Image: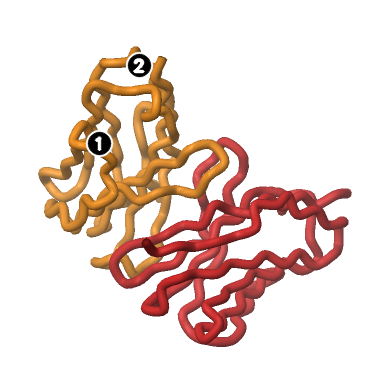
Amino acid sequence: QKEVEQNSGPLSVPEGAIASLNCTYSDRGSQSFFWYRQYSGKSPELIMFIYSNGDKEDGRFTAQLNKASQYVSLLIRDSQPSDSATYLCAVNDGQNFVFGPGTRLSVLP
Amino acid sequence: GAGVSQSPRYKVAKRGQDVALRCDPISGHVSLFWYQQALGQGPEFLTYFQNEAQLDKSGLPSDRFFAERPEGSVSTLKIQRTQQEDSAVYLCASSSTSGGAGTQYFGPGTRLTVL
């Protein structure tokens, strides 16, 4: 059984702080890694993806991947109240996506 | 441009009824996925189509669940003899790449409530 684990939260950070979201996965054959944001009652929307070890930056978001540790994270700089949502980590083995349960982030004004 | 659309957005069924959920993927997307999302959980994979071929149905929870994509575009997920445990949001996603390696774009989902 391929597993993706995330801390369910809620993770609360003050406005302007850095939010750090973590994800671990069990399948060493995983090839690509995605972060989705899901507002309550809405569908998941893609934030960013990462394939290679290291960091990938896109605006206020940075994804970090460490395949040896089977760990992927998402950093959100200058967090805003509008970032309050559930963040889903998805891991792809070339065939299927396996989603984690999501981490609920709350950015306090 | 049009994204993934799903209908109906909400469906209430009495236990034992059959339901059909529709997904219109992004035009030209070869891959189509169905997921089931329970409250407070991440989406769980149900089935995958590449064009009209159903290449993976390992996530379908029982033989009451059936999906089709006869012309390689619109897909229908059918649930026969619905049970209360079928209550969930059913998400459809499509991707421009074959296989599961590419980015998936999600529709708004259908919230199914079985009474």
| Kind of element beneath mark 1 | strand
Colour treatment of the image: by chain
- The mark nearer the N terminus, 1 or 2, is 2
Residue in view at x 41 percent, y 79 percent:
A28
Instruction: Tell me which corner region of the image, top left, top right, bottom left or bottom right, holds residue A66.
Output: bottom right
Task: Identify the colour of chain A in the image.
Answer: red
Dot 1: chain letter: B
Quarter of the image for the N terminus of chain A: give it: bottom left
The residue under the point 64% across, 69% down is A74
Q: Colour of chain B?
A: orange
The reply to the same-chain question for discs 1 and 2 is yes
Circle 1 is placed at which residue position?
B77
Q: Position of residue B4 (x, y in %)?
A: 37, 46
Q: Nearer the viewer, residue B7 or A55?
A: A55
| Residue shown at the point (20%, 47%) measured from the top left | B73
User: In this rendering, would B80 be left or right of B14?
Assistant: left
Residue B34 locus on image (x, y percent): 32, 46
Q: Amino acid at mark 2?
A: Ala
Left or right for B103, reference A9: left
In the rendered structure, the answer to whether residue B91 lies left or right of residue B31 reads right
Which is nearer the eye, B101 or B36? B36
Is A46 above or below relative to A40? below
Quadrant in which residue B29 is drawn: bottom left
